[in-house]
Image: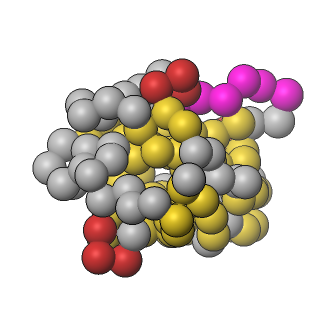
Amino acid sequence: QVQLVESGGGLVQAGGSLRLSCTASGRSVSMSSMGWFRQPPGKEREFVAGINWSGSSTDYADSVKGRFTISRDNAKSTVYLQMNSLKPEDTAVYYCARGLTVRVPTASHQYDSWGQGTQVTVSS
C-alpha cells in the first residue's frame, strides 16, 4: 500500500509561483510513473503533468506547458510540481497519484493511490 501526501499549496497572486511536493510512504514508488491532477471548483478532475519512473520522460496539459515543471527525487520518494506564472484559472485542489503504466499516463483511470490534495488559490 502506498500513501501519498501533498504539500506546498496556498494563496498566491497572479504571476507568482508555488512548488508542490508529493511524498510517498509505504511501498516504494521509485519504479512507478507519477502524476499531478487538479480539480477546479465545480469542475471535473483534470490531468496536469506526469513523469516516468526515471524522470527522463514528462508530459503536460496544454494549459500548463511552459509554466509548470514536474520532477522527482527517488531517493526522497518525492515528486514536485513547480508552478510559475500562475493564473487565476489555475485555482484548484491539486492531487498527486501513482501511475499504473510504464509510459507517462494522462488519464485518471491509469493512476491509483491518490493523495488527499492541496489547495492552490491564485488571486487576480
Could you tell me which residue is drawn at 72 percent across and 54 percent down? Answer: 116
Looking at the image, which is closer to me, 87 or 82?
Answer: 82
Residue 17 is inside the magenta segment: no
Q: Which residues are magenta?
A: 42-47
38 to the left or right of 35 = right
The picture places residue 123, in percent across and down from the top left corner, at 75, 57
Q: What secondary structure characterizes most of the magenta part?
A: loop
Q: Is residue 51 visible?
A: no
Could you tell me which residue is drawn at 62 percent across and 71 percent down? Answer: 8
The picture places residue 96, in percent across and down from the top left corner, at 55, 50
Please give the count of numbered marks on the rendered protein.
Answer: 0
Q: Is residue 10 visible?
A: yes
Could you tell me which residue is drawn at 85 percent across and 28 percent down? Answer: 42
**Taking 90 as reference, is 25 above or below it?**
below
**Residue at the limit of the structure toward the bottom, as seen here:** 76
Q: Residue 69, located in which quarter of the rendered image?
A: bottom left
Looking at the image, which is closer to me, 21 or 113?
Answer: 113
Looking at the image, which is closer to me, 87 or 102?
Answer: 102
30 to the left or right of 5 = left
Q: Residue 35, located in which quarter of the rendered image?
A: top left
**Taking 47 as reference, is 18 above or below it?**
below
